[in-house]
Image: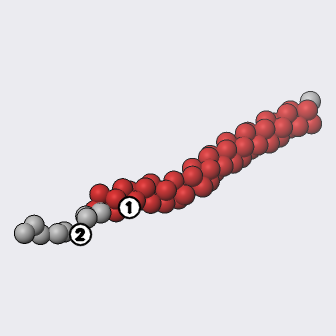
Amino acid sequence: MTERRAPTSNKWITLEGTHFILLFALIITKPLKYYLHMQLLQCCLNTVQSLCRVRLQWTLDYLFNL
């Protein structure tokens, strides 16, 4: 007599688990990537702004000291 076994679905579970982990990682990293990108952009804008401010201050000082 042959012994009946329930079909194993471990492969399916691991595939689903991997899919879930990848999806979860994507959900976390996508906003994080945009956040870091926006932070970098903000930092660059602040640097340019402060450089322009300094340049403007130098120009005004130069003009007033003529």
- Residue type, label 1: Gly
Where is residue 45 drawn, in percent x and y?
72, 43
Residue at (36, 56) in percent of width and height: 15
Question: Of marks 1 and 2, which one's residue comes earlier in the chain?
Answer: 2
Residue linked to disc 1 = 17
Q: Is residue 26 left or right of residue 50?
A: left
- Residue type, label 2: Ala
Quadrant into which the N terminus falls: bottom left
Of marks 1 and 2, the one in the foreground: 2
Q: Nearer the viewer, residue 5 or 38?
A: 5
Residue linked to disc 2 = 6
- For the residues marked 1 and 2, what is the alpha-carbon distance in whole angstroms? 21 Å
Q: Nearer the viewer, residue 13 or 59?
A: 13
Where is residue 31 drawn, in percent x and y?
60, 55
Disc 1 is placed on an element classified as: helix
Where is residue 7 drawn, in percent x and y?
25, 64
- Residue 3's disc is none
Q: Which image quadrant for residue 63?
A: top right
